[in-house]
Amino acid sequence: MSLLSLRWIAPGLLLILLAGCGRESSPPPSVSQVATTAKERLDGFVEAALKNPKQAGDQLTILLESLDAYAKEYGGGFIELRDMAKAMVPEVKNAKNKLELEGMLGKLQNKMNEIAASPGK
């Protein structure tokens, strides 16, 4: 390639790169979208926990990472949900049977349903 052609190619490449830099990034998800995602994750956790109750405590600990992030970012009901889940970890790990586990996890689902129904609160 000659020096003359590089003289024309380099500015062209620079313009192409700069054209992409001015675009706005997508907006962050709304509280409603986050509530829907959190509900799906919680429902998936409950389903998996009831299929394998011995792993429920460990799975809840993993879910807590997401709940903690939601609580820090969106506050409100997500803080209550995270705190409720955190307090339940020992109980879930020591659940004697599936019925007892269903009762505990049902409380989490009820709280999540409240958040999803009115995510702005």
Image (cartoon, helix red, strand yellow):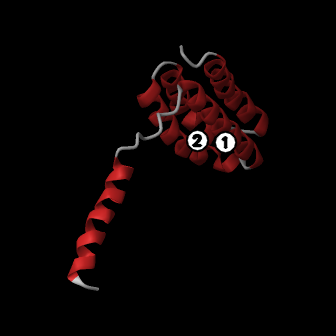
Q: Earlier in the sequence, mark 1 or mark 2?
A: 1
Judge left or right: residue 64 versus residue 15.
right
Q: What secondary structure is marked by label 2?
A: helix
Inspect the image, locate mark 1, and give the three-letter code of the amino acid beneath it.
Answer: Phe
Residue 40 at x, y percent in the picture: 67, 37
Residue 9 at x, y percent in the picture: 30, 71
The CA span between labels 1 and 2 is 7 Å
Instruction: Determine the residue positioned at 25% across, 76% down.
Output: 6
Residue 57, relative to residue 114: is it above or below?
A: below
Residue 7 at x, y percent in the picture: 23, 72
Judge left or right: residue 26 versus residue 2.
right
Instruction: Determine the residue positioned at 70% across, 44% down.
Output: 49
Depth check: 29 or 53 in front?
29
Q: Residues within 10 Å of mark 1 (few under 14, many from 20)?
A: some
Name the residue that disc number 2 marks.
Answer: 60
* Residue at the farthest front position: 4
- The image quadrant of residue 90 is top right
Q: What secondary structure is marked by label 1?
A: helix
Inspect the image, locate mark 2, and give the three-letter code of the amino acid beneath it.
Answer: Leu
Judge left or right: residue 95 versus residue 69.
right
Residue 94 visible in rendering: no
Name the residue that disc number 1 marks.
Answer: 45
Asked if marks 1 and 2 touch (Cβ < 8 Å), the reply is yes
Judge left or right: residue 65 versus residue 43.
left
Depth check: 25 or 15 in front?
15
Residue 100 at x, y percent in the picture: 73, 32
Instruction: Determine the residue positioned at 75% across, 39% down.
Output: 97
Depth check: 2 or 98 in front?
2
Residue 101, relative to residue 20: is it above or below?
A: above
Residue 10 visible in rendering: yes
